[in-house]
Image (tube, rainbow, N blue to C red):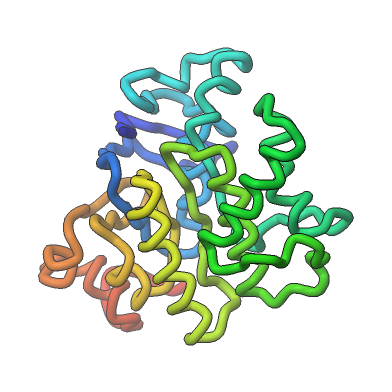
Amino acid sequence: MIKLIGLNKSFGKQKVLDNLNLEIESNKTTVIIGRSGGGKSVLLKHIIGLIKPDSGSVLVDGEDIARMNDRELNDIRRKFGMLFQEAALFDSMDVGENVAFPLKEHSKMTKEEIRKTVAERLAAVGLAGVESKMSSELSGGMRKRVGLARAIALLPEIVLFDEPTSGLDPVMAEAINQLIKETQRNFNLTCVVISHDIESIFKIGDRIAMLYEGKIIEAGTPAEIRATTNPVLRQFLTGSIEGPIKII
């Protein structure tokens, strides 16, 4: 579904992506891990075309979005949904209006069709009947669920998750992990997840990729990642201060 080939990106003198290569399989969940400030969010923005690489290709369904103009990008972005780290709900809108927003902007549905679709998407994330609540009334976990309902409103092929369990207690984090797995399976999605949560990555990931110093240094199944002999990856997974990753 997505293929990153030779991606390079620098901001001033800081090289963030360094000849990065990664393949993201269709209808599976790929988790990208790495240090804070290591370029994971920059990589995610390349995948959806918010940032263009200095060189290299970002292939989505075989089309290089790094070479597209704004109109072409807008068309291909309809394949995507995104759950932002803090859910990014509109505070001035109630839950129903938040989920309905992409439907109003990018579809020709009638008001009744939108109402029905909003109800279906909220039910799919375990929040049936909360349309009239304001975002300020929601817990952190509920906000993430509403954000996910909005992300899948238009039935995208790909959903990007930026730290989906960030700021949640262990019980709610586990609930979100289960929800991601169920949503991926029920809607047959290709999911890309950025996460620091080591427990979560092994629960939700079909494949896991480690970003370090601008490159994907290893990618594989959860079993392959657990069995790695790569010293950087082992140190990251164990959280040890001893190893090649230096604390600055």
For residue 102, say whether it is visible.
no
**Which residue is at a point 28% across and 81% down the rendered structure image?**
238
Name the residue nearer the viewer: 201 or 127.
127
Name the residue nearer the viewer: 212 or 96.
96
**Which residue is at a point 46% across and 56% down the rendered structure image?**
38
Res 222 quadrant in image: bottom left
Spot occupied by residue 177 in the image (x, y as percentages of width and height): 42, 70
Q: What count of labels does the image hold?
A: 0
Decide if residue 79 is on the left or right side of residue 27: right
**Is 190 placed above or below 208 here?**
above
**Which residue is at a point 44% across and 66% down the rendered structure image?**
179
Decide if residue 65 is on the left or right side of residue 27: right
Decide if residue 108 is on the left or right side of residue 196: right
Name the residue nearer the viewer: 176 or 149.
149
Spot occupied by residue 141 in the image (x, y as percentages of width and height): 61, 74
**Is 95 placed above or below 178 here?**
above
Spot occupied by residue 229 in the image (x, y as percentages of width and height): 11, 68
For residue 47, say whether it is visible.
yes
Res 142 quadrant in image: bottom right
**Which residue is at a point 36% across and 44% down the rendered structure image?**
190
Spot occupied by residue 72 in the image (x, y as percentages of width and height): 55, 15
**Is 56 placed above or below 237 here?**
above
Decide if residue 194 is on the left or right side of residue 50: left
Name the residue nearer the viewer: 236 or 14.
236
Q: Where, quadrant-wise, is the N terminus in this rendering? A: top left
